[in-house]
Amino acid sequence: MVDFWRFGMGDARTNNLRGCLAEYVVGLAVNAIPASRVELDAYDVLALSGTRIEVKTSGLVQAWNKSDPRSQIKPRWKVRKGNAHTDIGGKPKRLHADVYVFALVTSTCSADYDPLDLDKWEFRVASRWQIDEFDRSTFTPSNLTVDGIQPVRWAGLKDAIAAAGPQSVTDEMSLFVAIKLATEHLGERSQAGIGS
């Protein structure tokens, strides 16, 4: 198995591995449930509070040579799927998450690239209504700043997500919602034969 990890996951500068790592890092910040990643779900992270989070990521350093040092994120926000275990056909495209996190690895050279160092990440957090308001197909750190989305470090990420998420939920209700969502999620995985 170690040989497989070296083969398939040996370069954290690649988009797919960096994206998976970003979801994990965001999940750590918000005590995500369930603790394992669900591929192709309608959102990437479910916080203990019940907030659904979509994570998009990029890096100033890529696995390939890049002529433009600026980082761009080209997200696909609106999707048809309801979740990873249901048929996606026939549903109108819509936003599925409550909060959107743009994660950027700020290392500027390969020698300095260490995505496990949380000080090398910055995060920009937007609410669903902000994403609805933005008329962009590509996001860069600079145009997010113009839109009023300021970067935060990992230590401030949980608070930034809470501030951007649904505001009318009490702590007790958050726990109830989180348990309900987690139970439904695990039930869908069980019905789909995942994890058995």
Image (cartoon, grey):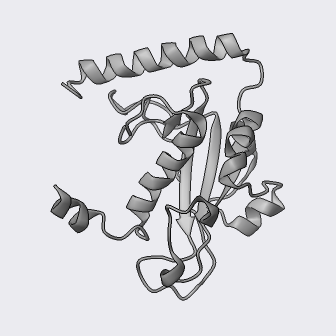
Can the viewer see residue 77 in this picture?
A: no
Question: Would residue 103 appear left or right of 146 to someone viewing this image?
Answer: left
Is 14 located above or below residue 100 in the figure? below
Q: Indicate the position of residue 17 as horizontal and vertical percent values.
A: 39, 60
Q: Percent position (x, y) of residue 106?
A: 62, 70
The residue depicted at 50 percent of the width and 13 percent of the height is: 180
Residue 148 higher or lower than 174, as above or below: below
Q: Quadrant of residue 169?
A: top right
Picture quarter containing residue 160? top right
At horizontal 16% and vertical 63% (from top left) the residue drawn is 3
Image coords of residue 189 (percent x, y): 30, 24
The residue drawn where x is 66% and y is 11% is 173
Q: Quadrant of the C terminus?
A: top left
Residue 33 vs residue 175: left or right? Answer: left
**Above or below for 25 versus 145:** above
Residue at x-position 23% and y-position 28%:
195
Q: Could you tell me residue 15's position as x and y percent?
A: 43, 64
The quarter of the picture where the N terminus appears is bottom left
**Tag count:** 0
Say which of 169 and 4 sits in front: 4
Look at the image and tell me whether residue 101 can be seen: yes
Nearest to the observer: residue 194 or residue 122: 122
Query: Considering only vertical position in the picture, is 43 above or below 143?
Result: above
